[in-house]
Image (cartoon, rainbow, N blue to C red):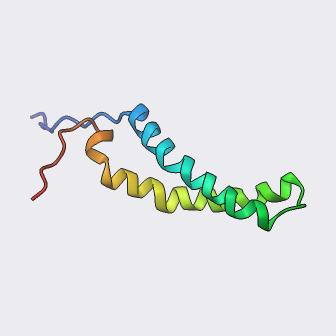
């Protein structure tokens, strides 16, 4: 007997990318404004070596999970949940 399951929500990579861009752009810009004066005179590769881990870990462990949790309904193309 075939098992009946609910249809899986369809992930919208475009919607996820728009939300990620909206969150990551100001974050990276802020990091650059903070790090540039502190690393004045450093070669570009050294600045990048400092900036990249900060960005990656912040995005992977902070920004992306927060976006996926808060906006799952939007990313998965589902109706917005009612606020009780």
Task: Give the residue drawn at x 29%, y 40%.
Answer: 74
Q: Looking at the image, which is closer to me, 18 or 72?
A: 18
Q: Looking at the image, which is closer to me, 58 or 25?
A: 25
Q: Looking at the image, which is closer to me, 41 or 3?
A: 41
Spot occupied by residue 40 in the image (x, y as percentages of width and height) = 85, 62
Task: Give the residue drawn at x 55%, y 51%.
Answer: 26
State the residue lying farthest toward the bottom: 38
Above or below, comparing residue 75 to residue 69 in the picture: above
Spot occupied by residue 8 in the image (x, y as percentages of width and height) = 24, 37
From the image, which quarter does the C terminus lie in?
A: bottom left
Above or below, comparing residue 46 to residue 73 in the picture: below
Spot occupied by residue 38 in the image (x, y as percentages of width and height) = 78, 68
* Quadrant in which residue 77 is drawn: top left
Q: Is residue 34 left or right of residue 18?
A: right
Spot occupied by residue 1 in the image (x, y as percentages of width and height) = 9, 34
The mark total stands at: 0
Above or below, comparing residue 43 to residue 10 in the picture: below
Task: Give the residue drawn at x 34%, y 36%.
Answer: 11
Task: Give the residue drawn at x 73%, y 63%.
Answer: 35
Q: Is residue 78 left or right of residue 49?
A: left
């Amino acid at each position: 007997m075939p098992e009946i399951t609910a249809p899986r929500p369809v992930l919208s990579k475009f919607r996820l990318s728009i939300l990620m861009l909206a969150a990551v752009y100001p974050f990276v810009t802020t990091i650059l404004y903070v790090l540039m004066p502190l690393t004045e005179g450093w070669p570009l590769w050294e600045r990048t070596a400092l900036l990249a881990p900060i960005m990656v870990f912040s995005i992977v462990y902070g920004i992306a999970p927060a976006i996926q949790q808060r906006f799952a309904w939007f990313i998965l193309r589902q109706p917005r949940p009612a606020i009780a």
